[in-house]
Image (cartoon, rainbow, N blue to C red):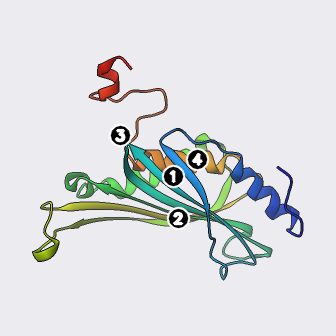
């Protein structure tokens, strides 16, 4: 893809790298409006992850570029993500969930050789119980990952596949090419 005119080459190259990724079939990526006050240049993708026709996780990945750089970023480029999913209350209550959820990001970046620095973030797990007019299931669990990191290089072709792997892990999808036990398609011969 040709860089857009009027944009700094580094930013245009980074956006092109994000646009080249073809995620697995369960993940739908769309370009969404990026926040305009965080950096002089910004680009954002939204994601929806479906399993058995149900949306089970969502996310947003924001590319920020400031030609002058930021000391905290340790460079001019920053990726910021937010990923969320509904969980069974038993999973949401697991004390290991934050560490496991964080490892999904770290491991995916390493697996895709997405070199980075200055990584930080939070994993939040919550259990909500509904009452009164909002009564529903006895308890609902939620998972949120908020993180940011600075790519070492503006070529982001490894960063988006890593982020898609995080989305898939958050959604509870098996690795590509693996059929989960109990999957109706596996039992039907499809």
Q: Position of residue 176 (x, y in %)?
A: 49, 32
Task: Give the mark nearest the N terminus, 3 or 1.
Answer: 3
Mark 3–mark 1 Cα distance, whole angstroms, equals 24 Å
Residue at horizontal 35 percent and vertical 16 percent from the top: 189
In which quadrant is the C terminus drawn? top left
Image x and y of residue 6, in percent: 89, 70
Query: Of the residues under marks 3 and 2, which one precedes in the sequence?
Result: 3
132, above or below 79, in the image = below
Q: Earlier in the sequence, mark 4 or mark 1?
A: 1
Give the answer, above or below, for where 132 lies relative to 107: below
Residues packed near mark 1 inside 10 Å, few (<14), some (14 to 19) or many (20 plus): many
Instruction: Give the labeled residue for mark 2.
Output: 147
Element carrying mark 2: strand
Q: Residue at x 17, y 72 (%)?
A: 134
Instruction: Give x and y (percent) for residue 123.
Output: 40, 63
Compared with 182, 98 (above or below) is: below
Q: Nearer the viewer, residue 116 or 10?
A: 10
- Nearer the camera: disc 4 or disc 3: 3
Q: Residue at x 31, y 57 (%)?
A: 86
Q: Residue 63's quadrant in the figure? A: bottom right
Q: Quadrant of residue 81?
A: bottom right
Label 4 – label 1 distance at C-alpha: 7 Å
Tag 2 and tag 1, C-beta contact below 8 Å: yes
**81 sits to left or right of 4:** left
Q: Report the residue marked by disc 1.
A: 105
Q: Which mark is residue 162?
A: 4
Q: Which residue is mark 3?
A: 52
Q: Secondary structure at mark 1?
A: helix
| Inter-mark Cα distance, 4 to 3 | 23 Å
Q: How far apart are the alpha carbons under marks 3 and 2?
A: 28 Å
């Amino acid at each position: 893809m040709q860089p857009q005119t009027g944009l700094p080459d580094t930013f245009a190259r980074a956006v092109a790298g994000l646009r080249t990724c073809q995620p697995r079939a369960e993940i739908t990526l769309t370009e969404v409006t990026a926040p305009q006050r965080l950096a002089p240049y910004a680009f954002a993708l939204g994601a929806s992850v479906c399993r058995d026709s149900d949306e089970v996780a969502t996310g947003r990945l924001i590319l920020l570029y400031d030609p002058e750089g930021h000391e905290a970023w340790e460079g001019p480029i920053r990726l910021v993500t937010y990923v969320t999913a509904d969980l069974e209350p038993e999973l949401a209550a697991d004390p290991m969930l934050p560490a496991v959820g964080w490892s999904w990001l770290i491991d995916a970046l390493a697996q895709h050789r997405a070199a980075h620095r200055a990584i930080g973030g939070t994993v939040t797990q919550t259990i909500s119980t509904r009452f009164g007019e909002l009564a529903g299931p006895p308890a609902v669990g939620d998972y949120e990952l908020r993180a940011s990191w600075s790519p070492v290089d503006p070529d982001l072709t490894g960063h988006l596949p890593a982020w898609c792997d995080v989305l898939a892990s958050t959604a509870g999808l098996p690795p590509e090419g693996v059929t989960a036990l109990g999957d109706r398609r596996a039992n039907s011969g499809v």
